[in-house]
Amino acid sequence: MQDRYTGDIGDYVKYGLLRALGEGRRLGVAWYRFPDEDHNSDGRHVAYLKNPRQWRHHDAALFDELDRIVDSGQRKVAAIEKSGILGPTKFSGAILSASELTVPQRRVWRCQWFESVQTSMQDCDVVFADPDNGLCKDEKFGAANQKSWKRLPLHEARMLAKGRTAILYHHNTRYPGGHAEEIKHWQDQLGTRTLAVRWRAYSARTFFVVNPAAGMLERLIRFSEEWGPKAAFHPARGPSR
C-alpha cells in the first residue's frame, strides 16, 4: 500500500470486501505501507467517483467517504483510519523504509517490523495484509532489499493466517497459463480451503481468503455477485468448510 493509492478504484473494492467479510469480527489491517513512488500512474484511477450511477450502489456509504477523502486532497492511509469506514479496526501502519541502515541492519529491521505487525494483530480474528505487489515465494523475497518489501512472502502469509482468517491482497502477474492458473497456484500454497475473488478493473488483483470463518463462503459469493461482472469468485481447491 502507498498513500497515493488512497481512494482509487482498487481501494473501493478492497474496503468493500473488508466491510462485507469483517462485519461482526475483530478486524486488523496490516498496511505493508511503502513510501510513495512517482515512476508510474498507479493510484490515479479515481474517475469512478464521478460516475456514481455506475458505482455508488455497491456500497453507498463507502463510496461517499472515499469521494470526500479524494476531494479533500488528503489521499493518505491515515484518512482511511480516521474515517471509521472499517468500523472498530486495528491498524498496523509503520512505513517500510529504512534506507539509512546498512544491509545487515535492514534485514534485522524488516524482521522486527513483521514481529511488531504480529503483536499488534494478536487480538484480531480476521487480518488483512495489503502489500503493493502481493504474494511471492520465500526464495524470491530479500529481507534486506527494500524493493522486496513491496511483496508478502509466503511464510509471513501463513503466519498471519495461523489460527484465524487472513485476507491477502495479490496483484496478478503474467503467470504462465493466465490468472486462473496463478490463483490456483497460490490457493494450493496457502491451503486447500482458501477462497479467492479476482477484481478486473484497469489491472487484475486477487484477494485470497485463507482459513475462512463460518459464513465467509456465503458472504464472498454474495459479494462477487453484487460487485460483478468485474468480480469473479474462485472456490476453494478442497473442502471449504
Image (cartoon, grey):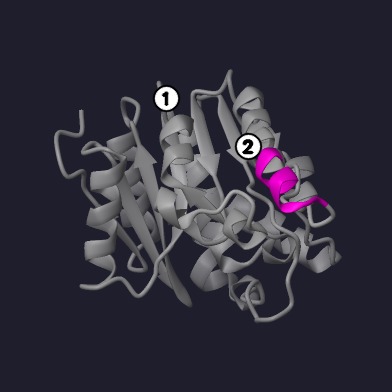
Answer above or below: position of 100 versus 70: above
The crowding category of the residue bearing disc 1, from other C-alpha atoms within 10 Å (few below 14, some 14 to 19, many at least 20), is: some
Residue ID at (28%, 57%): 183
Circle count: 2
Q: Dividing the image into 4 quarters, which one contains the N terminus?
A: bottom right
Apparent side of residue 35 relative to residue 149 in the rendered image (left or right): right
Q: What is the quadrant of residue 238 in the picture? A: top left
Question: What is the spatial separation of the Cα atoms under label 1 and label 2, in whole angstroms?
Answer: 21 Å
Residue corresponding to mark 2: 111
Query: Residue sitting at 75 percent across and 42 percent down?
Result: 94
User: Residue 131's x, y, as percent?
Assistant: 56, 53
- Considering every residue shown, the one lying at the far left of the view is 238
Residue at mark 1: 164
Q: Which residues are magenta?
A: 101-108
Residue 102 located within the stretch drawn in magenta: yes
- Name which residue type carries label 1: Arg
Q: Residue placed farthest to the bottom in the image?
A: 40
In the rendered image, the vertical position of residue 92 relative to residue 206, given as above or below: above
Disc 2 is placed on an element classified as: helix
Disc 1 secondary structure class? loop
Residue 199 percent coordinates (x, y): 40, 64
- Residue 137 is tagged as none
Query: Could you tell me the amino acid type at mark 2?
Result: Cys
The answer to which of marks 1 and 2 sits earlier in the sequence is: 2
